[in-house]
Amino acid sequence: MPSKRAAPSTAPRLLSGGNPQIAKGEGNAPVQAYIAAMPDWKQPIGARLDALIGQAVPGVHKAVKWNSPMYAVAADAGWFLSFHCFARYIKVAFFRGAALQPMPPEPSRSADTRYLHITQEGMLDEAQFLEWVRQAAALPGERM
């Protein structure tokens, strides 16, 4: 009798810290694949972040690069925001965050970038997040 082999998993592999490994690509589909692969409590927060970004910037351009969703005002405008899963939090990067008022709370090695860390226990201040997204989208994007 032939042995039964398990079908290969089609689920994305989780990298260290639980960040999904998603092939880079432009558009909504790779971003939605990333969000669907976010582990545990992070998935609904990722979906909410994506929805809020789309609300603040109608027609936002999306992509996945470096295993992170990236957001720009237009395809050639440069990136204003991304997020990435870590073991204990989701790190939202505002690439021109030092120019936002008030500045997002977490510093970066880059003088321009500021971060927001969202933990499982933490509450997302959606009004403040929307304001940061609107401000960030109005600034020149980061070319990467």
Image (cartoon, helix red, strand yellow):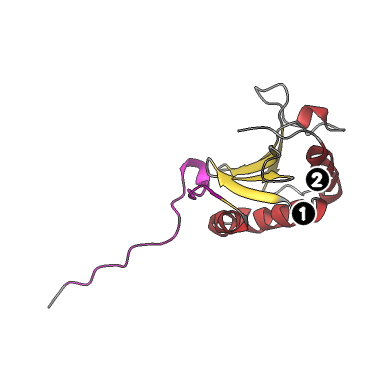
Query: Is residue 120 in view from this perspective?
Result: no
Looking at the image, residue 2 sits to the left or right of residue 49; the answer is left
Q: Residue at x 68, y 54 (%)?
A: 45
Q: Quick one: quadrant of the C terminus?
A: top right
Question: Disc 2 versus disc 1: distance between alpha carbons?
Answer: 8 Å
Q: Quick one: quadrant of the N terminus?
A: bottom left
- 7 drawn magenta: yes
Q: Nearer the viewer, residue 126 or 100?
A: 100
Q: How many marks?
A: 2
- Image x and y of residue 94, in percent: 72, 36
Q: Which residues are magenta?
A: 3-25
- Image x and y of residue 36, in percent: 57, 60
Q: Earlier in the sequence, mark 2 or mark 1?
A: 1
Q: Which residue is mark 1?
A: 52
Q: Which residue is mark 2?
A: 129
Looking at the image, residue 139 sits to the left or right of residue 85; the answer is right
Label 2: state its secondary structure. Answer: helix
Q: Residue at x 80, y 45 (%)?
A: 129
